Amino acid sequence: MMLRQIVFIPVVILDTIVHSFLSILVGIFKPYSRLNTIIIRNWARIILWTAGVKWEVEGLENIEPDQPYIITSNHQSHMDIPILVAALPVPLRIIAKKELFKIPIFGWGMKRAGMLSIDRSNRAAAMHTLQEAEKIIRREKLSILIFPEGTRSADGAIHPFKSGFIMLAINTHLPVLPVTLSGSRKILPRGKFLARSGKVKIHIHPPIPTDNLEMKDRKTLTARVEKIIRETFQSNF
């Protein structure tokens, strides 16, 4: 346990630097390539292995490998991104807060790997990000991962979902794939830097089609997705 904590930060830094440079090199030519997807997944799995994180996935039968989704999950920890990138068997990219893109090397790697920056304080800029995501989804047939709470939960509870992910799903006619994460906060809570080993449960719910939905349905669907994720999360504790 102590050894893992000692090596965790140095390994994460080295892992991030190496894989960020690889993403930058590959991204110069094709940021949404299968190779960059492999690079991102390897980066995530090394972090989880170093921290001693194990995961259990339920509901893999709800994923069709060649079907892009708008993946939406609750957000408990910095570990959530590596966990979902490593565990979900689909090529995906992330809509992440703009502050992450300011981190030297890591931010450059994220950009070249095709991740999208969102400014949560600027509605117009956030809408532009969603429009860019629509173009990428249509062109590259990739899934997009969004945390609709907007930020990590400070108290462990699930906070109200914002409806941006629903707008993206309706505009692209892609199904929403709700995912419930349980246990990641114990591994790396908000405000902490040293991860603890532990087990995370990932519950993949049946996808929700959006083909026949309109913007007037967004609040209803947002509430439905939040309810699905919240109920499973609460049942795990």
Image (spheres, grey):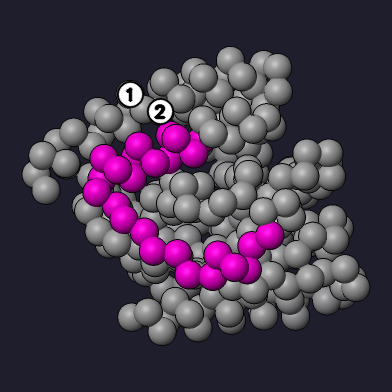
Res 128 seen here: no
Q: Nearer the viewer, residue 33 or 123?
A: 33
Element type where label 2 sits in the image: helix
Residue in view at x 39 percent, y 55 percent: 77
Q: Residue furthest left?
A: 2
Q: Quadrant of residue 201?
A: bottom left
Q: Position of residue 205 (x, y in %)?
A: 59, 73
Q: Residues within 10 Å of mark 2 (few under 14, many from 20)?
A: many
Q: Position of residue 89 (x, y in %)?
A: 56, 51
Alpha carbon distance from label 2 to label 1: 5 Å
Query: Measured along the vertical axis of the image, is residue 195 above or below residue 24?
Result: below
Residue in view at x 42 percent, y 40 percent: 44
What amino acid type should be assigned to the residue bearing mark 2? Thr
Q: Position of residue 15 (x, y in %)?
A: 36, 27
Res 31 seen here: yes
Element type where label 1 sits in the image: helix
What amino acid type should be assigned to the residue bearing mark 1? Leu
Q: Which residue is mark 1?
A: 14
Residue in view at x 83 percent, y 76 percent: 217
The magenta segment? 40-64
Q: Residues within 10 Å of mark 1 (few under 14, many from 20)?
A: few
Q: Which residue is mark 2?
A: 16
Would residue 17 appear left or right of 96 to someone viewing this image?
Answer: left
Residue in view at x 58 percent, y 15 percent: 25
Q: Nearer the viewer, residue 208 or 10?
A: 208
Would residue 91 appear left or right of 74 to someone viewing this image?
Answer: right
Task: Count how many numbered circles sit on residues in the image.
Answer: 2
Query: Measured along the vertical axis of the image, is residue 225 above or below residue 144?
Result: below
Q: Nearer the viewer, residue 121 or 214?
A: 214
Q: Position of residue 192 (x, y in %)?
A: 27, 49
Q: Quadrant of residue 17?
A: top left
Query: Measured along the vertical axis of the image, is residue 159 above or below residue 53?
Result: below
